Every structure is written in structure tokens, then in C-alpha cells.
Image (cartoon, grey):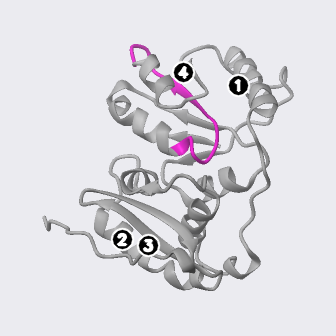
Amino acid sequence: MRRTQALPPVVHAWGVNQAYAELLTRARPLAILDVPHRECAPDVERRVAALRRLAPVVVLLPEGADTAAVLDAGATNVLARDMPVEELAVRLAADRRWVAAHEPYAPRELPRELLAHPASQRVLLSLLLFQDVTRSWCCHDLMQLLGSAGQPMSRAALYARMLRLEGPLGRLGLVLRRTGGWGRTGYSAVPASASVPVTAPTITPVRRIRVA
């Protein structure tokens, strides 16, 4: 790291609110998704597609993993996680320079009146307020982001969290809009004049982010 004059990355487990808050609010962030072994690799593409909406993503993959599929999911770069540390540091520094030169950036900050809410609510509000206005958040991406490394959040838990956002959004003159059909729901925050009611889904009872 000394060669590149770069600080070591801040390491968080997958699903930690603080990690997402940093990616959403820091200037020109770069997410490094560390996949330690092949057993974690099957769902990496979905994780990358969701994480890519927060920040550019570089993925560290074990030998034999499908690099092309991860790049196709939206990764900025894929590196072998077993390469020498010095080489890895240099390559990550090059990726940061590329991101700074090519990725659009606009400062993102929650309105002051929302800062007193719990961290989990602030992250969800940030995801909705800072999103591309042409895209809603798919429930499956949100469940993946907000779950643990081993298991996505349940649909029922996500729906309950979304309902708790109605008050904070209302104070900004916004409402939560739900679109799509059963099994795949999109969420977005829109002006109250464009509101569509949120209805309950049918539920059957029954800065390196590490995938452990």
C-alpha cells in the first residue's frame, strides 16, 4: 500500500448499514467485493448488480470462478484474490483512478430532517432518494443487499421496513410507490401527486465487503 500511497480499505461484512452509508455518501467511492471461496460465487452476479447501484464495484474472485459473468453483471473490474498484495494494491489504485476519471459523481446527502432516524432507515431512504429516477429498486435486489452474507432478507421483513418509510418520506412531500406483479416488486419514492398505493404482497409462511 505504501507504493500506491493509498490507505487500506475499510472492511465490512455484507449487509452492514455502515458500509452502504459510506458508499452512498463518500466522494467517488469504490466498493471491493471479496469472494473468499467458490462456494460463495453462485450468487455473486446478483450481489454485484445490486451493489453497483451504490458505487463502482471491483470483485476479488477465487481461482476458477466465472469472471465473464461477474463483469456482465456490472463489475468495473475482476481481480484474482490470490495475487500478491503489492500487485493487488497497484491494480486497485489504477481502478480508483479510472473511476475518478470516468464515473459521474454528484454529492449525495440526506435532508437534515431525516438524519435522526435509525441507521437502517437512513440507508433505505438513501437508496430510494439517491436512485436513478428512471429505475425503481427491485425487491430481490433490496432483499439481497439488506440480508446477510448467507441469506437474503425475507420479503415480509422488507415489506415491514418499507411501510416504516411512509412517515419520513411524507415529510419531504414524497410517497412510496410500488410497481410490478407478484414475486417481483419495484419500489421508488415519488412526489405525492404521482402516488400509487402500496399493497401487501402475498407471503407463504414457512470499503471491502466480504462474503463469508
* Residue at (36% x, 52% y) in the render: 140
Give the labeled residue for mark 4: 81
**Tag count:** 4
- Which element carries disc 3, helix, strand or loop? helix
Q: Separation of disc 3 and disc 4 at Cα? A: 36 Å
Task: Return the mark for residue 159.
Answer: 2
Image quarter where the C terminus lies is top left
Q: Is residue 212 visible?
A: no
Magenta span includes 23:
no
Figure quadrant of residue 190: bottom right
Q: Earlier in the sequence, mark 3 or mark 1?
A: 1
Residue that carries the numbered disc 1 in the rendered image: 92
Region in magenta: 51-65
Determine the secondary structure under disc 1: helix
> Which numbered marker is on residue 115?
none
> Is residue 94 visible from the viewing direction of this image?
yes
Residue drawn at x 64%, y 37% is 56
The image quadrant of residue 2 is: top right
In the image, residue 44 sits, relative to residue 3, either above or below, namely: below
Whole-Å distance between the Cαs marked 4 and 2? 36 Å
**Dot 3, how many residues are within 10 Å of its Cα: few (below 14), some (14-19), or many (20+)?**
some
Q: Determine which quarter of the picture holds residue 22.
A: bottom right
Cβ atoms under marks 3 and 2 closer than 8 Å? yes
